[in-house]
Amino acid sequence: MDEVRGEFYFQENQLFKSYNINYKFNTSGYLLYEVVRSQNGVLIFLQEHLDRLSRSILSINLYNKTEFKKAENILKKLVSVNNDKEGNIKLLVKRVDQRICFSAYYIQHNYPDESLYKKGVDLITYKIQRPDPHLKQVAISDLIRREITDYIKGSNVFEVLLVNESGYVTEGSKSNVFFIRNEEVITATDESVLKGITRGKVIEILEEGNIKLIKRNIHLKELNSFKGAIICGTSPKVIPVRKVDNINYVVNNSICRYATEKFNEIFQNYITRYK
């Protein structure tokens, strides 16, 4: 169940007032999802989100080009009828009579306070993994969210890093992670994680800045050998890490600053372009 924010929502391609469901949306029966950020009336990196979703739908043999075109229209309509409300929108996919249907609504979001971009965020690790990290599956996401919510209850932790059965750190529950050592940046392989939209932008930023990027598996035992880290995602954008478990990192390092500032430029330029 998700708490719906905003005055209107879409269910199976139809628009409704939020009071019709008492602000709770039952996600049971939905297969895949995306979360898209809306700011200043602009759906941030919309095409990248839709491209990823189309690949996911295709992988489960549900793709229909004509039906899929409705997804973009639903998202844009949702922003419009909610008066350009800022926040995160969840787009859900289900099968109805062998065709795809979409539901969409604003969800609760957690955007970091500006001070956290200066002092960094605290993370903890948790042993759990997604069966297929390339797919944003509703059932798997709900399972992980329930486990993690119980795990971090009462703590001040911003995010949880997932550790697989072999002891390797893969990604955050809602983010991707990059570690910094000796002017090099290390992140998990593409095969091990969800190819996050923000992650892709960070990789481009590092490549354009001639910063060496290594994609490989990162063991839990290695975490104390890094000097810094950043996480990235739809809500946090790009933010430095202050601590993982009991390991402290340097927040004010050049690579953290560079990645954060460059991404903010891309983010703002996107809004200006599509406003």
Image (spheres, rainbow, N blue to C red):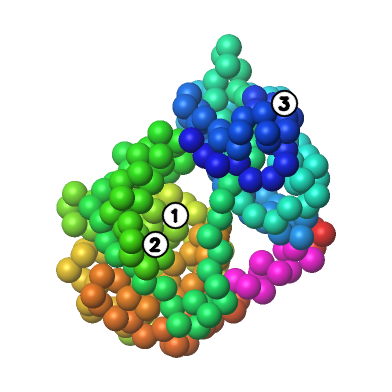
Question: Which amino acid, by three-letter code, is at mark 3?
Answer: Gln
Image spot of residue 36 (x, y percent): 62, 49
Report the residue marked by disc 3: 14
Name the one closer to the observer, 158 or 244.
158
Query: Eyeballing the image, is 89 above or below 178?
Result: above
Report the residue marked by disc 1: 174
Note whether residue 236 is visible: yes
Note whether residue 255 is visible: no
Q: Residue furthest top?
A: 97
Question: Which amino acid, by three-letter code, is at mark 1?
Answer: Lys
Query: Eyeballing the image, is 178 above or below 171?
Result: below
Image spot of residue 150 (x, y percent): 31, 50
Which label belongs to residue 159? Answer: 2
Q: CA distance from mark 1 to mark 2?
A: 8 Å
Magenta-span inclusion, residue 77: no
Residues at circles 1 and 2 in contact by the CB criterion of under 8 Å: yes
Assess disc 2: are there few (<14), some (14-19) or many (≥20) residues with their C-alpha within 10 Å of its C-alpha. many
Name the one closer to the observer, 22 or 231.
22
User: Which residue: 21% across, 71% down?
Assistant: 222
Q: Earlier in the sequence, mark 2 or mark 3?
A: 3
Magenta stretch mostly in which secondary structure? helix
Q: Quadrant of residue 209?
A: bottom right
Assess disc 3: are there few (<14), some (14-19) or many (≥20) residues with their C-alpha within 10 Å of its C-alpha. few
Q: Which residues are magenta?
A: 263-272
Q: CA distance from mark 2 to mark 3?
A: 34 Å
Name the one closer to the observer, 244 or 64.
244
